[in-house]
Structures are given as structure tokens and as C-alpha cells.
Image (cartoon, rainbow, N blue to C red):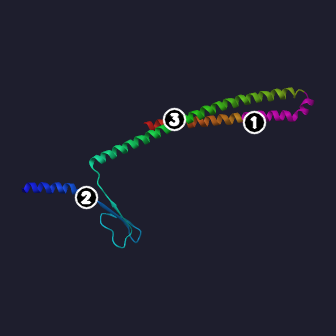
Amino acid sequence: MKYFLTGITLIVLFFTAGELIADKVYTWTDEKGGVHISQDPPPKFAKNKDVIHYKPMSAEEIRETKRQREKQQEAYKERIRSEKLQEVQKARDNAENARKEAIEARASAEEEVKKANEFIYRHNRNRYLRRVFRYENRKAAESAIAAQERARLAEDKAMDAEKKRKSAEDSANEDEK
């Protein structure tokens, strides 16, 4: 009988031990503004009293929580990887578009220079034509210079886009390691 009572006592203690350890946590603020967290009830002068009821989790609940957390972390990592790949693809597209624009701007500038040279050559053969078409010749030359500047800016933009693409790819590759 002695062993039976000891066994029953141990079983009862085992099931109630979790509640005896910490089933309430008190938080309160003292008169100086300090926040206290303890298992002891707060004093009467305390402000902002709050009681947190704590229920310990079972081993299975802990394992399930860990599994859920790992799933969330994997989903987060996958989302980040997906965003990085989208960023890389966007940088590639931007670089390709900038290259095309630079090629078109260069071709346009070459055409503008060719037209300006032909116009100036036709109207620069004698003193009379030079004097009559002086402003038109200047305008044609300025137009050609402006077209060359647009082409240079487009090429600079293409180079910047290429650098951003390279940086995005390096960043994505670095994250995969």
C-alpha cells in the first residue's frame, strides 16, 4: 500500500508540476517608470499591472512549432530567391533595352552627321552660298553634335544598366552560396 500511495503521489505531482513552475507572469511599472517582469505579484503602488497566464507547451507542441517555423523560414528564403531572380531578369531586360537604344541612337547620330556634312558641302562651295546658308549650315552642324551627344548619353545609360545587371547577378549568386 505504501508503494501504491507513493506512486499516486508521484503521478499527481508530475501532472501538476507544470502549473506549479510558472502559470502566471506579472508585468508592472514602478513609480520611476521601470518595467518589471516576475512570477511574484506586483506591489500595491505599481502602475500598469498586467498578468500573463502561461501554459507550458508539450513536447509535441514544441516540435510542431519548430516545424512551422522552419516552413516559414523556407518560404521566406524562397520568396527572397524569387525576388532576386526577378530583379536579375529585370536588370537583364533593362540592359538589353539600353543597348538597343544606344545602337539606335548611334545610328541616328551617324545619319544626322552624314546629312549635315552633305548639306554643308552643297551649300559651302562659294562665298555667296556660304553667306546665304550660314545659319542653316550652323543649324545642321549643331543638330549633328546634339545627335552625337544623345548617342553618347544612351551608351552611358547602357553601360550603367550593364553594371547594374552584373551587380544583381553577383548578388543573386552570392545569396545562393
Residue toward you, 73 or 124: 73
Q: Which of the image's four quarters has the C terminus?
A: top left
- For the residue marked with disc 3, what is the amino acid? Glu
**Label 1 is placed on what type of residue?**
Ala
Determine if residue 171 is in view.
no
Question: What residue type is disc 2 on?
Answer: Glu
- The chief SS type of the magenta part is helix
Residue 30 sits in quarter: bottom left
Residue underneath mark 1: 146
Q: Quadrant of the N terminus?
A: bottom left
How far is disc 3 from disc 2 in space, using C-alphas?
54 Å
- Mark 3 closeness class: few <14, some 14–19, many ≥20 residues within 10 Å: some
Q: Nearer the viewer, mark 2 or mark 1?
A: 2
Left or right of 109? Residue 90 is left
Q: Residue at x 84, y 33 (%)?
A: 137
**Residue name at image x 74 percent, y 34 percent:** 147
- Residue 167: x %, y % from top left: 53, 37
Q: Are marks 2 and 1 in contact (CB under 8 Å)?
A: no
Where is mark 2, residue-wise?
A: 19
- Left/right placement of residue 67 relative to residue 79 reads left
Query: Please, what secondary structure does the residue beneath circle 1 have?
Result: helix
Instruction: Residue at 8% x, 54% y: name it.
Output: 3
Residue indicated by mark 3: 169
Is residue 138 found inside the magenta-colored segment of the image?
yes
